[in-house]
Image (tube, helix red, strand yellow):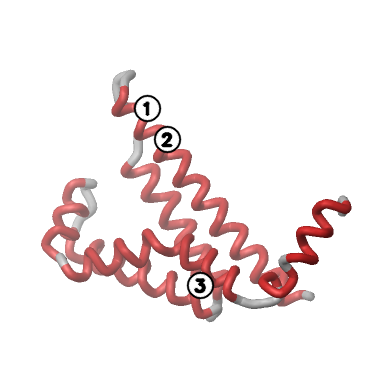
């Protein structure tokens, strides 16, 4: 480790030894899923309309499953209860939802395609984050 990096690590040691930073990171990673789950739960007709929009039938069943997945997997990650499983569940869900909702390659060139492509690749970044969470959690069980 470089001297500069080591000095930074030493200066931040009190913070790095707490669990607040990982918790805030997990919370940030799960924020959209918590918000989405609670929004769908509080406005179920709109959640059903969203499922219909993407051609998922029966829409009430899919809406219920998405709500349960978003909230349960997020809580698993935040509490560390089978964190790896919650992370893989949200990562897999995000990957599938990204290919369903953000088919940017089917849009004509222009701003809408540009924005959809950006969102598509941002979602792939979330999938990578969830894979990292699962890997780190499983790896910690071997150490």
Residue topped by disc 2: 118
Q: Residues within 10 Å of mark 2 (few under 14, many from 20)?
A: some
Instruction: Give how far apart the Cα atoms at labels 2 and 3 are.
Output: 26 Å
Residue sticking out furthest to the top: 109
Circles 2 and 1: CB atoms closer than 8 Å: yes
Mark 3 falls on what kind of element? helix
Could you say which disc has been placed on residue 77 in the image?
Answer: 3
Horizontal side, residue 36 vs residue 19: left or right: left
Mark 1 falls on what kind of element? helix
Q: How many marks?
A: 3
For image coordinates 82% across by 59% down, the residue present is 7
Could you say which disc has been placed on residue 114 in the image?
Answer: 1
User: Is residue 9 positioned above or below 121 on the image?
Assistant: below
Of mark 2 and mark 3, the one earlier in the sequence is 3
For image coordinates 22% across by 64% down, the residue present is 40
For image coordinates 69% across by 70% down, the residue present is 16
Instruction: Give how far apart the Cα atoms at labels 2 and 1 are.
Output: 6 Å
């Amino acid at each position: 480790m470089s001297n500069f990096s080591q000095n930074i690590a030493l200066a931040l040691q009190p913070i790095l030894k707490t669990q607040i930073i990982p918790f805030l990171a997990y919370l940030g990673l799960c924020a959209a899923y918590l918000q989405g789950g609670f929004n769908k739960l509080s406005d179920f007709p709109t959640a059903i309309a969203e499922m219909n929009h993407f051609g998922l039938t029966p829409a009430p069943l899919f809406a219920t499953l998405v709500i349960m997945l978003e909230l349960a997997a997020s809580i698993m990650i935040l509490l560390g209860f089978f964190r790896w499983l919650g992370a893989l569940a949200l990562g897999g869900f995000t990957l599938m939802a990204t290919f369903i909702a953000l088919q940017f390659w089917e849009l004509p060139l222009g701003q809408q395609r540009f924005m959809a492509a950006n969102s598509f690749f941002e979602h792939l970044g979330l999938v990578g984050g969830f894979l990292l969470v699962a890997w780190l959690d499983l790896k910690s069980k071997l150490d």
